[in-house]
Image (cartoon, rainbow, N blue to C red):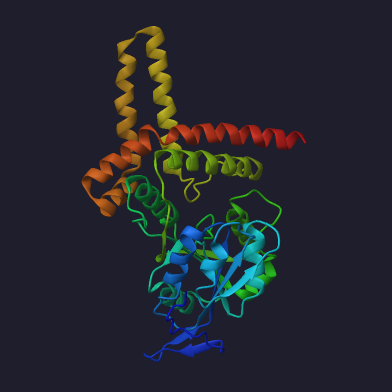
Amino acid sequence: MSRPWSYFPKRTQDVYNNQGKMEKRISLVIPNYNKAATVGKCLEAAFSSGYDNFEVIVVDDNSNDDSVRVIREFPCKLITLESHSGTSRARNIGAQSSSGEFIFFTDADCLLLPDTLSIVNKELSEKGENVVLGGTYTKMSYDRNFFSTFQSAFVHYSETKNPENPDYIAAHAMIMARTTFNKSGGFPEDFMPILEDVEFSHRLKRSGSRLIMCPEIQVRHIFNFNLKRSLFNAYRKTTYWCTYSFGNRDILTDSGSASAELKTNVASFFLSLFIIALWSLTKTPSLLYAVPLIFFSNAVISRNQIRLFYRTKGFLFAVSAFCYYALLYPLPIGLGTATGFIRHLLKERQ
């Protein structure tokens, strides 16, 4: 199936658009593994950009679905790996094969907005070329059900609350000069299956790179979450996060989606459970008075998150999202924290 794309990658490093503004050459690097259901939407969004001076490199990590056929419908550079090697290696190979002055890392289930690359070009011009820029998810996800929208809004808030000094930049929208990438050593290839962008960010910081989060740089994520997937995602990410953070000794850091508000939220949940359990044993009614007080205090601490829920989809969504966030979401995070701590201890004893 052919597509009537009119896009032809330019070969020069810097070009000028119709308004006479310089456009830096940007290489969009996308790792793909069994994302046939989303990679077509990802590439269609990329090639619908209002920006001209860019290329798209997709590295297929030995997918066993229909991904390669879908990718070949688009005028991108396709690199196919002979064996499944992991997301980090796919990103590193894509970056090494790029021709752009700057590299934009994103994922095969993320959709650039029409002006995303133009905003990147503007931010690079204003903030300098030696910074590492980060973007985030749109508040509203591509699939607009409750759990997907909750996740997108939650991540958007968490990642953008500290724009001038973020703890890390997520690889769903990470931009840097190719020279910076080459000096860094790239993403860690012998690492956990996720959080490679967190380790990479911390290494970039230690080497002197300045990380900046730009909330205007946005991609729309395809989650396809339901209740089960939402809870499992929270458990899985927390498990790996805590395994890494206990070893890195920064478990209490106010860091992206592992924000201080989220940690307070989880602590409030388990403190309430403890009080209810203590009441069931002692039958002391006054103990229960503390539970609504804890819930209200948690709401006050999380007020900016609640405000973003409201701006995303209105009052009813904000109430429902906070109730889910406060009354159920902490459970898999607590279990993930315990699992991560155990894995850390086992790793320390090896």
Task: Provide residue 183's location: percent of width, then percent of height.
Answer: 69, 70
Residue beneath the point at 33% across and 24% down: 291
Task: Provide residue 20's location: percent of width, then percent of height.
Answer: 40, 92
- Front residue (pair 5, 331): 5
| Residue reaching furthest to the right | 350
- Front residue (pair 2, 315): 2
Residue 59 quadrant = bottom right
| Residue reaching furthest to the top | 282
The correct choice, above or below, for 115 with respect to 154 in the image is: below
Image quarter hosting the C terminus = top right
Residue beneath the point at 69% across and 57% down: 189
The correct choice, above or below, for 154 with respect to 88 in the image is: above
| Residue reaching furthest to the front | 1
Residue beneath the point at 48% across and 34% down: 332
Residue 27 quadrant = bottom right
Task: Provide residue 212's location: percent of width, then percent of height.
Answer: 49, 64
Task: Provide residue 292's location: percent of width, then percent of height.
Answer: 29, 26
The correct choice, above or below, for 73 with respect to 326 in the image is: below
